[in-house]
Image (cartoon, rainbow, N blue to C red):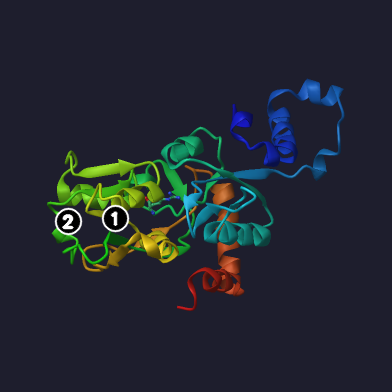
Amino acid sequence: MKQTRRTLLAGMLLSAFAMVGCGQKADTPAKSAASAPAPATMEKVYTVGSDASYAPFEFQNEKNEVVGFDVEVLSAAAAKGGFKLKFVNTPWEGIFAGLQQGDRDILASAITITEERKQTMSFSDPYFEARQLIAVAKGVSDVKSFQDLKSKKIAVQTGTTGDEVVKKLLGKTSPNIKRFENMPLALKELESGGVDAAVGDNGVVINYVKNNPQHGITTVEDAKSFAPEFYGFPVKKGNQELLDKVNAGIKAIKADGTYEQIFNKYFGTK
Ligand code: ARG
């Protein structure tokens, strides 16, 4: 089941790791009967789930590899913490279930640490501060603040903190909230005039507007209406051993300047 989701390209080498990982648990006899390489050299590779439609935090490059700010931060932390990672593009919709079921060991997906999510997963220390940002059509929109969206049609990515804030303003069941499985789709709906605004994480909205200048979108900031949000890397609830490794890695890259280097690469100096 895990195998079918992998790209062919990444598959060959990586599935070899995964199969050995399963073999250790499930079929020791088969393994000992076949080739038995020194187990001491077999290091655990943690599978990281990222919804790679979220540039600049996680997206796919031309080679279909998952890249971005989150990938570099977690990879640098892993290098310091002495553990190995494999990033797998994982749709947002099933990302938390994948962690719960053990298909993913860590999530790196610009995930805001919330009280509600803390009930079902364990978060690393925060690694990035974000805020919601409003996107509207350039030149024609009269929206100046979040309150102005009360009677408008708004696009969000389903189940995100953007969805949460808009739900609070318009009411949970409002037909004016249009939900999309990823953020680019929500922003495209705005471009095509299907909604009056889109609400999402500032870094992603800014990045999209910057890279699509011909699409006539602009942003409306409303720092008073939106609380600061902090991204963390969740692991399965209670996986303290992995959490400790991730946190030690984050601490180390913050202390030695690596984090700052990565931050500046993606967001310029503060
Ligand atoms: N920060 C927001 C949240 O946690 C949005 C994250 C969406 N991430 C993604 N890769 N699609 O709800």
Q: Residue 175, percent across and down?
A: 18, 39
Q: Residue 108, percent across and down?
A: 51, 51
How far apart in space, not on screen, are marks 2 and 1 (Cα)? 10 Å
Q: Nearer the viewer, residue 223 or 82?
A: 223
Please say if 208 is above or below 4.
below
Residue drawn at x 76%, y 24% as measured from the top left: 28
Q: Quadrant of the N terminus?
A: top right
The numbered mark at residue 199 is 1
Residue drawn at x 51%, y 54% as measured from the top left: 58
- Left or right, residue 195 beside residue 53: left
Return the disc, 2 or 1, that comes first in the chain's sequence: 2
- Left or right, residue 181 beside residue 35: left
Identify the amino acid type marked 2: Leu
Outermost residue to the left:
151
Q: Is mark 1 within 8 Å of ligand 1?
A: no
Instruction: State the image quarter where residue 112 is shown.
Output: bottom left
Q: Are marks 2 and 1 in contact (CB under 8 Å)?
A: yes
Q: Quadrant of the C terminus?
A: bottom left
Please say if 45 is above or below 32.
below
Residue drawn at x 49%, y 55% as measured from the top left: 124
- SS for dot 1: strand
| Residue 248 appearing in the image | no
Q: Residue 253, percent across and down?
A: 59, 68
Residue drawn at x 45%, y 63% as measured from the top left: 211
Identify the amino acid type marked 1: Val
CA neighbours of label 1 inside 10 A, class few (<14), some (14 to 19), many (20+): many
- SS for dot 2: helix
Q: Residue 80, percent across and down?
A: 66, 62
Provide the residue designation for mark 2: 149
Q: Nearer the viewer, residue 59 or 223?
A: 59
Outermost residue to the front:
214
- Left or right, residue 9 beside residue 229: right
